């Protein structure tokens, strides 16, 4: 595994959206909730959680889709309106954090998941990593 670069950057597939994070992630995870499955097109989504103030858009503006959160308020999933690439999640329940989609990183090789969340929604055919701590829903 490569060391975590700080700052790090990323963007969408077509290049319309670019971002930087000035802080290292406070957590890295796989989320198996149905909303993440639907928005990623896969059995889970992988995220880097960073302080909101560290996530800066340097080009373009994502379009956001909001869905109700079990915790409170809405979960706002930001994506490129041109190519559809998922970029970031901004949850009302935790406004101090932005969740960056790992696939949007310029160099995702250093991603190292620490937990799996919403395993209650994981599919039986999805082999979860036995080495990672698991949470049925949100971590405490």
Image: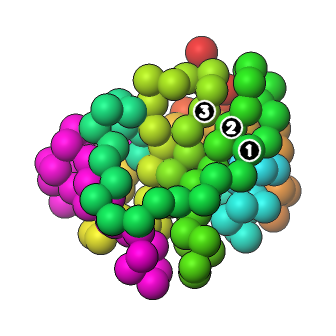
Task: Give the labeled residue for mark 1.
Answer: 66
Residue at x 28%, y 69% (from the top left corner): 107
Residue toward you, 55 or 63: 63
Q: For the residue labelled by badge 2, is the local secondary structure a helix, a strand or a loop?
A: strand
Residue at x 55%, y 39% (from the top left corner): 90
Can you tell which quarter of the image residue 119 is in?
A: top right
Q: For the residue labelled by badge 3, is the local secondary structure a helix, a strand or a loop?
A: strand
* 131 sits left or right of 20 in the view: right
Residue toward you, 34 or 80: 80
User: What residue span does the magenta drawing correspond to?
Assistant: 1-30
Can you tell which quarter of the image residue 70 is in?
A: top right
Task: Give the labeled residue for mark 3.
Answer: 91
Q: Residue 22: give x, y in percent of width and height.
A: 19, 43
The answer to whether residue 81 shows anywhere in this view is: yes
* 113 sits left or right of 86 in the view: left
Considering the whole magenta stretch, tell me its main secondary structure: loop
Answer with mark 1 or mark 2, whichever residue precedes in sequence: 1
* Mark 1 crowdedness (10 Å alpha carbons): few <14, some 14-19, many ≥20: some
Residue at x 74%, y 24% (from the top left corner): 73
Answer with mark 3 or mark 1, whichever residue precedes in sequence: 1
Residue 5 falls within the magenta-colored stretch = yes
In the rendered view, would you say 114 is above or below 12?
above
- State the mark number for residue 75: 2
- Disc 3 + disc 2, Cβ < 8 Å: yes
């Amino acid at each position: 595994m490569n060391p975590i670069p700080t700052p790090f950057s990323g963007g969408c597939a077509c290049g319309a959206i670019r971002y930087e994070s000035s802080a290292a992630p406070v957590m890295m995870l796989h989320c198996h909730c149905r909303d993440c499955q639907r928005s990623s097109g896969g059995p889970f989504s992988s995220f880097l959680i960073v302080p909101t103030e560290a996530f800066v858009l340097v080009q373009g503006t994502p379009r956001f889709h909001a869905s109700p959160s079990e915790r409170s308020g809405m979960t706002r999933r930001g994506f490129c309106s041109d190519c559809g690439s998922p970029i970031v999640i901004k949850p009302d329940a935790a406004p101090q954090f932005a969740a960056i989609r790992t696939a949007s990183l310029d160099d995702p090789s250093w991603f190292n998941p620490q937990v799996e969340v919403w395993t209650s929604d994981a599919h039986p055919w999805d082999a979860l990593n036995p080495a990672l701590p698991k949470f049925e829903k949100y971590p405490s």
